[in-house]
Amino acid sequence: MIQIFLKGGPVMWPLLVTSLLALTVVFERLFFTVREALRRDPEAVAGIFAQVQQGHPEEARAIGKRSRDYVARVLTYALEHSEVSFSNALLQSANQELQRFNRGISILDTIVTLAPLLGLFGTVTGMIHAFGLLGAAELGAPTAITGGIAEALIATAFGLLIAMVSLLPFNFLNTQLERARAEIETSAAKLELLLLRSGVDSKP
């Protein structure tokens, strides 16, 4: 494997850095996803809705403070910071949570695009070098030229492999982000509707 890597040319080193960066982001994001899944607390969210519906915003805030569920945090933050506009407080708290889910996705997006380009660049430079040796007496045999082209294609193969492996977690993380966005938006709209129906002042 090391010999194949070295035959790919100098561009294999930035490809190696790219692959290590992708692995780091993927493992960190998977850990984050599992941790947030374990912190989910639907009962706390339901309790917030129930207390607001009964006209007890203070109790709703107390329930939210005890929970580590990201939806409960959004609702609690909105209830605690609604001095000017409850809708703006909801939007701000939702954006804070979604930024946590969005972290690292742009890096994977860049890697999915960059890795094949780096591989193609390595192949092009390798083929230029191989054909440049075509006139050399010691490398004039066709097998030497085809061998040089085969080595040049190693970079493209590695670049495509990195992109394909990164694409799966990239799509998974995007799905998790959209799911979190949908849950937050649904819960925020429900809380706002309950406050309007109950006629309760959401200010602490």
Image (cartoon, rainbow, N blue to C red):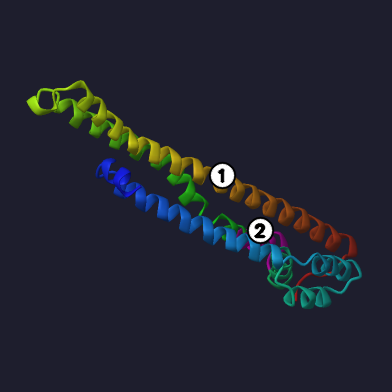
Where does residue 7 sit, x and y in percent of width and height? 27, 41
Q: Residues under labels 1 and 2: Cα distance?
A: 30 Å
Q: Which residue is mark 2?
A: 91
Note whether 79 is above or below 90 in the view shown. Answer: below
Q: Is residue 151 left or right of residue 70?
A: left
Residue at 65% x, 62% y is 34
Q: Circle 1 — which element?
A: helix
Report if residue 91 lies within the magenta region: yes
Residue at 24% x, 31% y is 148
Tell me which amino acid carries mark 2.
Leu
Note whether 163 is above or below 124 in the view shown. Answer: below
Tell me which amino acid carries mark 1.
Leu
Q: Which residue is mark 1?
A: 168
Residue at 30% x, 49% y is 13
**Stretch of the chain drawn in magenta:** 84-97
Q: Residues within 10 Å of mark 1 (few under 14, many from 20)?
A: few
Residue at 10% x, 28% y is 138
